[in-house]
Image (tube, rainbow, N blue to C red):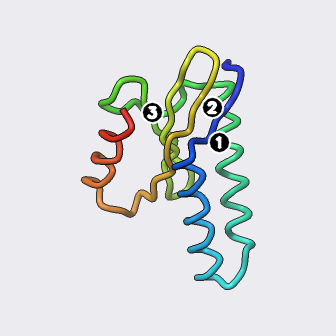
Amino acid sequence: MVGRLIWSELAQQQKKDIFDYWNERNKSKIYSRKLNMLFNEAAEMLIVHPRIGRMTDFDNIRIKLVRDYWLVYQVAEDEVRVLAVWDTHRNPKRFENLLKTLK
């Protein structure tokens, strides 16, 4: 178990963009609220079980699937840092590029 959870600025902006997209598409905030709840529940689980996510090819960076999104995170001794939120429908090569910038 780690002490705290931190959302990076990038991850916060990506969540906002995702929620804005769904709010506009659905003309409602209901789905965005549910998705936000799922993101938060998964992130809280990472505090208790920080190694639950799948390892990547990059040191200490893992991914946790939440619906159609990956929470990209890094585990330190006393914290879990959510680095990014990635839509799994996007081009996988762009995901690899994102990981390279995060390491």
Question: Of all residues shown, which one is farthest toward the left?
Answer: 93
Q: Which residue is drawn at 50% across and 29% down?
A: 74
Asked if residue 86 lies left or right of residue 33, the reply is left
103 on left or right of 28: left
Q: Is residue 53 above or below residue 94?
A: above
Mark earlier in primary sequence (3, 1): 1
Q: Distance between the residues labelled 1 and 2?
A: 6 Å
Describe the element under mark 2 as helix, strand or loop: helix
Name the kind of residue labelled 1 in the image: Ala
Image coordinates for residue 9, horizontal then vertical, percent: 57, 47
Assess disc 3: are there few (<14), some (14-19) or many (≥20) residues with their C-alpha within 10 Å of its C-alpha.
Answer: many
Label pair 1/2, CB-CB below 8 angstroms: yes
Q: In which quarter of the image is the C terminus?
A: top left
Residue 47 image-quadrant placement = top right
Q: Distance between the residues labelled 2 and 3?
A: 11 Å
Q: Quadrant of residue 6?
A: top right
Residue 62's label in the rendered image is: 3
Residue 25, percent from left and from top? 58, 82
Q: Which amino acid does label 2 sit on?
A: Leu
Residue drawn at (28%, 47%) of the image: 97
- Which residue does the image show at 30% across and 39% down from the upper left? 100
As helix, strand or loop, the secondary structure at mark 3 comes to strand
Q: Which residue is rendered at x = 57% and y = 42% of the image? A: 8
Residue 81 lies left or right of residue 96; in this view the side is: right
- Give the residue furthest to the front: 9
Res. 42 mark = 1
Tag of residue 46: 2
Helix, strand or loop under label 1: helix
Of labels 2 and 3, earlier in sequence is 2
**Relative to the observer, which residue lies in front, 89 or 17?**
17
| Horizontal and vertical percent position of residue 89 | 39, 63
